[in-house]
Structure formats: structure tokens, C-alpha cells
Amino acid sequence: MNLIFFLGKFPLLSIAEIFSVLKSKNIRYSVKMADENYLYLNLEENIYPDILLKILGGTIKIFQVEEIAKREEIKRVKNKNKVNLDDQEYALGNIVASQDIKEYEHREMDKPYTSPQTGMMPSKLAKILLNLAIGKKTTAIYDPFCGTGTILQEAMHQGYKVYGSDISKEAVAGTIKNLEWTKNEIGGRATEFEIFTHDGKILPDRLKLSKDNIAIATEPYLGLPWKDRIPKNVRNTKEITKVGDIIDSSIKSMSKILKKGERLVIIVPSFKVRHQIVNLEPKTSEYPNLVRISLINDLKFGDKHIDEMKSFLYYREGTVVTREIFIFEKV
């Protein structure tokens, strides 16, 4: 089965998500072509592209390839859609699945609790983080900085048991409202959830002995809501240091929850301080039995060759804070 995945704004992140989902579902594949616009795969078994697209957050649409035509043959082909592969060949077939924008808007705008003051994670990003975290044995998802519960909502839609916590009692109450709302929407397929007030830097006792295979996907505290750029002064330096300390303490704590083979996916911010970028690199050497992994290895990407990628950027134009996504696995 040959499929072309039309990729979102961050194509390498979209590709990593696709690879992660296919591997978690034991679907074997080979890469035929990849660039900033699309990923062309051969799948060794037939799947339902519409179901797959509902799982993915970084793919816009899926095109099923029926045949390949040379450039000189293309004028004779009618009533088929085509994708230009290179100067010599076209893929002929049909779009078999498209992203449902209205569904994303519904999940973001109609849920009962939102918090613009603390920031709102896009549902697409939440879905991507979730899919990067899920392994073959994962049965539950934990978000220790759950905020409004966006990642947990997406996990419920995929049928995973969810755990969430936040240091804010308001956020915990709001997340419970949002998950109840999600549960009513899903109906009989909805899964269990447990949300509690807790400091994300400390290991929660109730998850220490859990029998679930828990994966963790989260966006921790990213600092003050900066605007155009961060002025360089002592106060702001302390704030950035505070964010880094929270992230390192949280990773150390969260690693103790994971079973062997389960993943932790976490967003780490980079800050634009005047004309300088300040990166907060996780202190990998200090995390016991936790290694950074690459979901993209040995990939020809357009005219480039990518040996491996262990982190991915996600940002909006003109913002001061850039999200960098790191993927860890328990060994």
C-alpha cells in the first residue's frame, strides 16, 4: 500500500510522529521519498487512511497512490489526481483522508474550561506530543503539568487511561471538567481518568506502584508571558534559570514512574533575549536510566541527508519563546 502524507508546518516533526505511530502499531513501512511537503511511504499491509489521519496531528491529508506515470504520459491520464514526485514522474491516485479543521476548533473552543492567562496548547500539538510518547506496550498517559488537560483529552480519544496533575487547584478542577466533557462526547469508548493537585517536580506517590505502562507527555512551566522580546536584566535571568531548574527536577522525578521501554516527551523552551537565543538543554547525564532517542534516522530529506534527530522545534512567528520537543526513553 503506497501512501503520500502531506505534512504540516513542521515537516520533520510530522514525519517523526508518523514513524512513531506506525511503529507503535507494528505497521512495517519503507520510505520512498521525503521532503518539506510530503512523505511517501510503502506500507507492507493495508490500513484505513481515514482512521490513521484521525490519530495524527501533523499531517494535513493522505493520498493513496495507484500508479506512477512518466511526465510524457501524464497528458493521456484523465479523471485522476496527481502528485509531482520529481521532474520525471507523477504519482496518480486519490486523496483518501483530509484533516478535519472544524473538529479541532470544536475541541479547542467549545470545551468548558480554558485559561488564556496561562496559555493554551493547540490540539494538534497535544496530539503530536502524545503520539511521540506512545510505545507498543503503553496503556496509560500521564501529564504532570496538565493545565487545561489538552494532551489528556487527545489520549482519551485514542482510548488510553489518563492521569494528570497540576500545582494549580483551578487547573485541576478545569481539567476534570474538560475530561468529563470529552468523556460524554466519546460515549461508551471513554476510558478512566484520575486528576489530582501535585507539584510536577516531585514524584507522585499514587503512581509509584501503578501497574499501568505509563508514557508521559507534557509541557511544563515555560516562564512569564513575554511579549516582543525579553529585556536582559537580573530578574529575567533568574526567571529563565527557574524554568530550567523546574524542567530538570521534573524529568528526574518523572523518570522514576516509567517502566523500561516507555517514553517521556517534554517541551523545553528557548528564549529570545534581545538579539540572543538562550537554550535550556536538559541535563541528560543526570537522569538515571533515561536516554534521549531519535525517531528519525538515516533519512534522505529533499537534497539533504539526516543521520538522526533527537529534538524538534515548534513555534509561532513573532513569539519570544520557541518550544523544543525532547524525547526520552527508559532503559
Image (tube, rainbow, N blue to C red):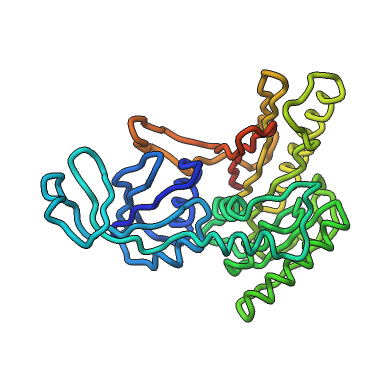
Residue closest to the eye, 309 or 273: 273
Apparent side of residue 105 relative to residue 118 in the rendered image (left or right): left
What x and y, as percent, mark residue 153? 66, 63
Report if residue 208 is visible in the image: no
The residue closer to the viewer here, 222 or 73, is 73
Q: Is residue 139 left or right of 34 when viewed as pictured?
A: right
Residue at 65 percent across and 75 percent down: it is 185
Q: Quadrant of residue 143?
A: bottom right
**Image location (x, y in percent) of residue 45:** 32, 64
Which residue appears at 55% of the width and 55% of the height? 131
Does 154 appear above or below 286?
below
- Which residue is drawn at the image coordinates 44% and 50% (left, top)? 19
Q: Toward the viewer: 56 or 122?
A: 122
Judged left or right of residue 163, residue 77 is left
The relative height of residue 302 versus residue 16 in the rendered view (above or below) is above
| Residue 68, x across and y down, in percent | 19, 52
Q: Quadrant of the N terminus?
A: bottom left
